[in-house]
Amino acid sequence: MSDNRREFLKKSALLGLGSIAGSLLGETKINALNTVETNLLGTEPAFTLPPLPYAYDALEPFIDKQTMEIHHDKHHKAYIDKLNGADNNILKLTVSDEQKCKMVSADTPALVRNNLGGHFNHSLFWQLLKPNPTQAPNLPASKLAEAVNQQYKSFDDFKREFSDKALKIFGSGWCWLIIDETKKLRITTTANQDNPLMQVAADKGQIVLALDVWEHAYYLKYQNKRADYINNWWNIVNWQKAEELFSAK
Ligand code: MN
C-alpha cells in the first residue's frame, strides 16, 4: 500500500470512528485510536519469510544451491504470501505459529491448514539442516541418542525405519520423529503440509526431526530418486537442533 493511500485510509477510519473514540478520555482514547488504526490498517504483514540460516550452497553436495534458492525463496515465500492473504481467526491470534498449528482441525479451511503448515514446517526444516558438512559421521548425541538406541535397538535400525517410512509416503508429505502422547519416540508421516502438532494428524506429538519429501525438495538434483535424497539427507541432519527440540519441555 502506498504511503498516501495508507494515510488516507487512516484518516477516514479515524474520522468514521470519532464518535466512538470521542466518548473516551485521555490516554485511553489514544490507545483506543491506536488499536483501531492497527486493526483496520495493520502495521506490517503478519507473517514474514525467515531468512535461511546459512548460505544457499552450504548444504552442498547433498542439497544443491539452486534447489535451496527455489525451495526457500519461492516455495516457502508462497506459503507466507498466501497466509497474509487469508482471513481466518487462527491467523490473527497473538500466539506462536506452533500454537496456531495445534488449533488446526478438520474444520479449518484448506488455505489456512496448508499454508500455515507449509510455513511452520519449512521454518523448522531449515533449522534442522546442518550447513558445511564434513567427512565425520553425522550422529545424534547425548539424550536423544540414548532414547533412540533404547527404543530402536541401534541408530542404524532407527535410520532404516525412518528412511523406509519417508520413502513410502505416497505423493507429497513429511516424515517426522516425534515424542508422542505417551512420551515415546515415534516415526510418523503426514500428507501435504500437515504436521504432528495439528489435530488432524493420526499421530500427534512434539516434533524432534522433520524431513520434507515433496519433489520440490529434491527433484532438480535427484529427479525421481527419492531414496538417494533421503540417504544423503542423513549427512546434513542438525542433531544439535534435534537434541534441543527433544529436550524442550
Ligand atoms: Mn518443501
Image (cartoon, rainbow, N blue to C red):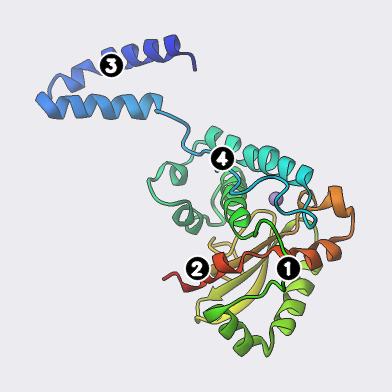
Closest to the camera, between mark 2 and mark 3, is 2
> Which secondary structure, mark 1?
helix
Viewer-proximal residue, 217 or 92?
217
Q: Amino acid at mark 1?
A: Trp
> Which secondary structure, mark 3?
helix
Viewer-proximal residue, 160 or 127?
127
Q: Amino acid at mark 2?
A: Glu
Disc 2 or 3, which lies upstream in sequence?
Answer: 3
Closest to the camera, between mark 2 and mark 4, is 2
Q: What residue is disc 4 on?
A: 49
Above or below: residue 224 compared with residue 240: above
In the image, which disc is placed on residue 244? 2
Asked if marks 1 and 4 touch (Cβ < 8 Å), the reply is no
The residue at 56%/52% (across/down) is 120
In the image, which disc is placed on residue 234? 1
Disc 3 or 4, which lies upstream in sequence?
Answer: 3
The residue at 19%/17% (across/down) is 19
The residue at 77%/53% (across/down) is 60
Horizontally, residue 24 falls left or right of residue 54, namely left
Asked if marks 2 and 3 touch (Cβ < 8 Å), the reply is no
In the image, which disc is placed on residue 14? 3
Closest to the camera, between mark 1 and mark 4, is 1
Task: Calculate the distance from the C-alpha at mark 1 to the C-alpha at mark 4.
Answer: 26 Å
Horizontally, residue 19 falls left or right of residue 88, namely left
Viewer-proximal residue, 173 or 88?
173
Disc 2 or 1, which lies upstream in sequence?
Answer: 1
> Residue 222: percent from the left, percent from the top?
87, 55
Asked if marks 2 and 1 touch (Cβ < 8 Å), the reply is no
Closest to the camera, between mark 3 and mark 1, is 1
Quadrant of residue 152 in the image? bottom right
Task: Calculate the distance from the C-alpha at mark 3 to the C-alpha at mark 4.
Answer: 31 Å
> Residue 118: percent from the left, percent from the top?
62, 49
